[in-house]
Image (spheres, grey):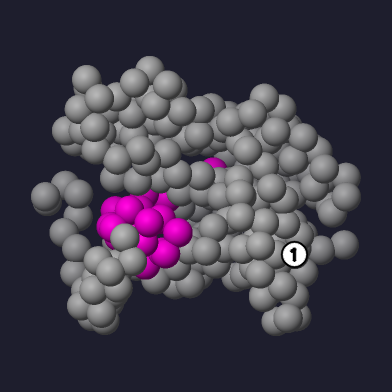
Amino acid sequence: MKPVCLVIGAGAGLGGNIGKRFARDGYHAALCRRSDSEGLKRLVDDIERAGGNASGHLVNAIEEGSIEDLVAKVETDVGPIDVLAYNLGAQIGDRSLEETSYKAFEMGWRLATFGLFRAASELCPLMEERGHGTLLVTSATAAVRGNAGQHSHAAAMGGRRMLCQTLNAQYASKGIHVVHVLVDGAIDAPDTLGKMLGPERFQVLRETRGAADGLMQPERMAETYFHIAHQHRSVWTHELDLRSFSDLAWWNR
């Protein structure tokens, strides 16, 4: 039976590439996203054409029971989940306090923090029984620095970071590796940055900054995720900053 890497938030950028990278090394990639069944099928087909193994799952992570049902289905139908890549975003754009509705604020928390809590609540006891497991949690600069207009995002990502720390405190000694990956820069991802900027601005950014390695490449990031998931436990990484060589770190900006 193949080990399983469950990717919650498997878009065309980072999440999809994480699935591809793990599948290339013998994992079954269980890919989950909220919408775009055709795009999800293309991603699964790409992995299988390359000789890998994958399945696609449409899940709205905000809905009650959705994450719990997903974990149970994958564990039953596919196999034990060795790696969870929790890659759900929670960015609603820059909004003043007056422009941030209760609903928008809560949505950020539900996706970034509560969703991770729900996934961990299902998976960590199973991983503890098996004596091993890895949670790779994608985060953002907002987890460590709250900027103007980032009320929802900063609160959500800050909570995500602290939850990773509390999970590590309880489960690291039991063989479960929890990694908070702080993405401190722009990713060359059409389904996130591309949508935020629009097609024309995104293409210009790719041709200028991206051509000089100033945008993080999802497939390169996926290599880092794979490496971290296979570290020896005597040298586990628990928090990591990722950015392009040309970007100033968040603490220097």
Q: Residue at x 75, y 64 (%)?
A: 54
Q: Is residue 4 above or below residue 220?
A: above
Instruction: Give the secondary structure at mark 1.
Output: strand
Q: Which residues are magenta?
A: 177-197
Q: Which residue is mark 1?
A: 54
Picture quadrant where residue 214 is located: bottom left
**In front of the other: 142 or 133:** 142
Image x and y of residue 179, in percent: 49, 47
Q: Residue at x 41, y 45 (%)?
A: 139
Image x and y of residue 61, in percent: 61, 36
Q: Is residue 15 left or right of residue 148?
A: right
Q: Is residue 74 left or right of residue 120?
A: right
Report the amino acid beneath label 1. Answer: Ala
The crowd level at tag 1 (other Cα within 10 Å; few <14, some 14-19, many 20+) is many
Image x and y of residue 212, in percent: 23, 80
Quarter holding the N terminus is bottom right
Magenta includes 48? no
Q: Is residue 214 visible?
A: no
